[in-house]
Image (cartoon, grey):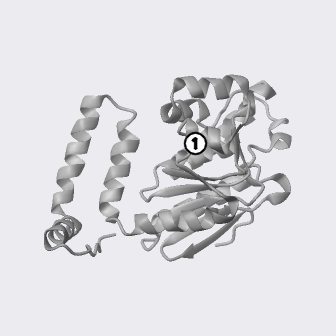
Amino acid sequence: MKLKYINFRRKDSVAWIQFNRPEKLNALNPNVLKDLETAVACCEEEHFVRVVVLMGYEKAFVAGADIEHMSKADVNSAYELTDLGLRVQERLSDLSKPTIAAISGYALGGGLELALCCDIRISAENAIFGLPEITLGIIPGGGGTQRLPRLVGVGAATELIFLGEMINADKAKQIGLVNMVVPLGRLKGEVEAFASKLIDKPALALRAAKIAMRRGIGIPLKEGLQMEQSLFCMLFGTEDQKEGMSAFLERRKPMYREK
């Protein structure tokens, strides 16, 4: 798989997707998004991949969209760009496997929106977050106005979106934007440790939990409860459920096998 703007590698059931446009602080353009879509599709198809990690480099996770590219857009080309971005983000958000955003440096605009598509966000202490689109005369166009309020609440999201100001990692942790903050030098190790915990869990149950949460947030509570019930009961037909409960009763570590 040849990708120009993404470094893609697999190690110990973890797929690492690293943005590779450092001269532009990993700014997003159609070529970057297409490479990302290819990498995400590969992660979905490869059964031995259990966890997917998105990362940048020390100075930037993704510093937003490529403003030079966007400045030339009109209404029609803006639709084309956002159609591509939303398609890639939905693919990432709907990925059946757990996803982790390992964030260092700038995570702004479209970069923050990509991080919001991930299940877990682990931040280095040097990370900077924001949705600065309002300062450019536009609004977030890749899910920022929708995913951020659902994650941190309307009040905190409104402040970030209306003012377009940036916040540091500690503030992001305070409002619930990230799950944990670690020193920059420990970021990769902490992500690997978290991924290892996920790999030890039953894959089918993780998938069911993700489906229940992701789909449930957009439907009425009663429908969500019914969906949860169906997924819960379905898992009683799996070998992992038998193994997990047998291991509990026998006081041993379970050996999950289903993918």
Q: Can residue 83 be seen in this view?
A: no
- Residue drawn at (74%, 36%), measured in percent from left and top? 77
State the residue at coordinates (73%, 29%): 164
Residue 81 locus on image (x, y percent):
69, 41
Asked if 248 appears above or below 64 in the picture, the reply is below
Which of these two is toward me, 172 or 114?
Answer: 172
Quarter the N terminus occupies: bottom right
How many dots with numbers?
1
Q: Taking 204 as reference, is 93 above or below it? A: above
Q: Hey, which quadrant is residue 36 in on the image?
A: bottom right
Would residue 83 appear left or right of 52 to someone viewing this image?
Answer: right
Q: How crowded is mark 1: few (under 14 residues within 10 Å), some or many (20 or more)?
A: some
Kindly identify the residue that appears in the image at 66 percent across and 58 percent down: 183
Q: In which quarter of the image is residue 203?
A: bottom left
Identify the residue position indicated by label 1 in the image.
Answer: 173
Residue 15 in percent (x, y) is at: 55, 68
Depth check, front residue: 194 or 143: 194
Position of residue 100 measured from the top left corner of the image (x, y, whole percent):
53, 56
In the rendered image, which quarter is residue 124 located in? bottom right
Query: Which residue is nearer to you in this view: 56 or 218?
Result: 56
- Label 1 amino acid? Lys
